[in-house]
Image (tube, coloured by chain):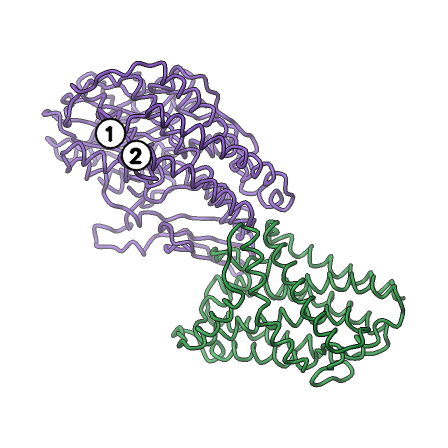
Chain colours: A green, B purple
Amino acid sequence: MSFILILLASFFFTGIVIRVKSIAQGRKGPSLWQPMYDIWKLLHKGSVYSNVSSWIFKVAPTIYFATVIVAMLVVPVGLFGSVIGFSGDFIFFAYALALGKFFTIIGALDTASSFEGMGSAREALFSMLVEPAFFILIGSLGLLTGYTSFSDIFAAFHITGEVSYAYAAIAAFVLLMICMIENSRMPVDDPKTHLELTMIHEVMVLDNSGVDMGLIHQATNMKFALYTTLIAGLFIGNVETWWMQTILFFGIQVISAMCVGLIESFMARYRMIHNAQFILVLSSLALLIFFGIK
Amino acid sequence: MKVTNNQVIRLADIEFLSYDNFFSNVNEALNHDEAHCVHYFAKPNPDRDGEFSLFCLIANDAHHDIDLLASVINKRDELQSLTAQHLCLHPFEREMHELYDICFVGHPWLKPLRYSHDRKAGGDIYDYPFYEIDSEELHRVGVGPIHAGIIEPGHFRFICEGEKILHLEIQLGWQHRGIENLFVEKKKLLQRATLSENIAGDTVVGHATAFAHIAESLAGWNTPEWLEIERAIALEQERIAVHTGDLSGICTDVAYQLGNAVFGRLRTPMINYMQKWCGSRFAKSLIRPFKTNFIFTEQLAEEWQNTIDKYKPDFVEMAEQMFDLPSVLSRIERTGIVTKENALNIGLVGMPAKSSGLLRDTRKSHPWGAYKDVDFQPIVKTSGDVYARARMRYEEVLASIELIQRLIAQRKETVMTDISDAPRTWSAQPESLAISLTEGWRGEICHVAITDKEGELALYKIKDPSMHNWLGLALAVRGNGISDFPICNKSFDLSYCGHDL
């Protein structure tokens, strides 16, 4: 059930972001389901492959998509619990996603384009910097609750009383930022730009087309929903009824998507060189929770 | 020989120096900071094989005149390169070398300007002698010739150390249409006027005005004051429209969506006003030599005021917000700096020059018609970065609005004269040279025409400000992150076709 809910959320997440950005610009904007139509269209197209790239380039998008699906299996939505859950599954979660990223990177390098090489280097650097923030954060929550599985952490999160909401607030901020970095959104990357030199994620998938492109887009949507599910988990742990949890879950998804849209509308993107500093700040925020718990 | 803007000189009156004298005179004239070369070109002498006349026009901003230096050379001569002394001459010598095989000894960068380097051997433009590196640590990034935003083609070759740009080389010429030759081939006045509007599609008024002045001065026709005022209004309106669009572009490149949307919206009424005036949003067919098809009426003046009353508050509010937003400032401050010293060396003109503390504005230093009596102070910034160039646009828009208001007031006081007896066709003095300088929104535009014995065009030379300024961009990005290149590029917003001609 968790799996289906997250999948559902992934269908409209990007649509909301785009809609919010359009409204902020004074436009009506496309339908909420437009990203889905686009993916559907891509899935019906053939792929074009460069004759200098190898099989790695061809399998990379599929593996990327598969790793996100696998990561989705361990994330619970409130009482529904995750499809599979075990002690230490948050480490599995992080490295399943990292495996997907690894394949996108080598897939991009496989094209031997100088743009894609640059994008890969940036993506690798930023992912590496994000990793400590994520582990310190979830590790601290594990320390707080005494469990190492997402389902148990979220279920037991509110045992410490009111103060847990303070942790949740900081954790939600950090997770939202990680989510934006991992999905190459503003302020670190600009998904809308047409300028290859400033791209991070977009430039890595320049050579992909058709089904592969569709898989990459959908994987990104699911990653968005995945991280916001973690945020939702922080808040809906002690809600008792399943229907209330479901409503809250979708509410938090929508609010997160709107936050992403608003951030992208009203600020400029960071200079590439400042991104690293910004990401390290997230680690220190995560440390704040760690020391708070200690 | 000293001339002023829009003056016609008989070729017989020009003193042709020996190349050695010419060399030392040009060298001496350019040693002053207030002087810069507006054009330098060669004209083949049809009677004698291999003989060329060189003409160098050096504008002096302090004395408000232009130094015309000329020389006769043979292409078999070994000529000492002037670029070795004054870098700002590099595109002109490269052009002569490429077109006529004139050899300049000691030119530091004698590469093709618009063609392939081995054009006579049937070479391809893809094959260009780029500056090469041999290093394990450095890498090359090639961008173009297809632009990511599919605007115009140009090839950029970066040499980077990680994210940092060490060197940028720009190869142009992909847009070469032979427009200078077309001017000579097409005999009709209307054909030439239309050609001038298409030199650079974003500077229609600028180039068309420059051509109109050439045609009028060669015919010995005194342009009536009211017509000159109308042209100045159009020129300033073009400046407002393009600057607003550029601010939108700068916001796009730093991914500031609000600025992009608002400035984009504000540009529309500005170009739509042009459509009301002349039926074309880009002011095509508005400027015609010896006449105007679209008189600036009282009603148009009123409509302009109404449009601006709606435009200005929004524009000021958006710009103030943009220049106040930390995330935007962090992207544009201290990015892409051109120092004043570099700006002088490479002979920057127009907006980028003024942003680097170099006052080069021909509206002030070499004014024509309406600009002669209107009170106006060019804006100068000193930091030379993207911020200065963006801020320059904001302030120039406000200045242009005020300027148009004054011009409109002046227009109302001026009596409209009858111009029905003006020439209808190309009619020019024989064997003369005419020069026309106009400050387009990008910077100084220079057109030069030389006529033959029958008064027909023998040579037409065009210089868009981009010719000087592309090198400025190449220098500005050194030491910057490669991801900041697009924003530097946008802040210069140079023309590809204006350079390639």
Crowd class of label 2 (few under 14; some 14 to 19; many from 20; radius 10 Å): some
Residues A212 and A226: in front is A226
Which of the 4 quarters of the picture holds residue B163? bottom right
Residues B462 and B252: in front is B252
Above or below: residue B481 compared with residue B355: below
Q: Residue at x 32, y 44 (%)?
A: B497
| Earlier sequence position, callout 2 versus callout 1 | 2
Image x and y of residue B209, in percent: 30, 29
Q: Residue at x 66, y 57 (%)?
A: A276
Label 2 to label 1: alpha-carbon separation: 8 Å
Q: Amino acid at mark 2?
A: Cys
Above or below: residue B55 compared with residue B267: above
Left-right relation of B41 to A105: left
Q: Amino acid at mark 1?
A: Asn
Which of the 4 quarters of the picture holds residue B452? top left
Numbered label tally: 2
Image x and y of residue A70, in percent: 63, 81
Task: Give me the chain letter of mark 1.
Answer: B
Image x and y of residue B390, in percent: 52, 38
Residue B278 image label:
2
Q: Are marks 2 and 1 in contact (CB under 8 Å)?
A: yes
Crowd class of label 1 (few under 14; some 14 to 19; many from 20; radius 10 Å): few
Image x and y of residue A268, in percent: 59, 49
Q: Quadrant of the N terminus of chain A?
A: bottom right
Residue B45 image label:
none
Q: Please tell me whether mark 2 sits on a helix, a strand or a loop.
A: helix
Q: Residue at x 45, y 17 (%)?
A: B375
Left-right relation of B283 to B342: left
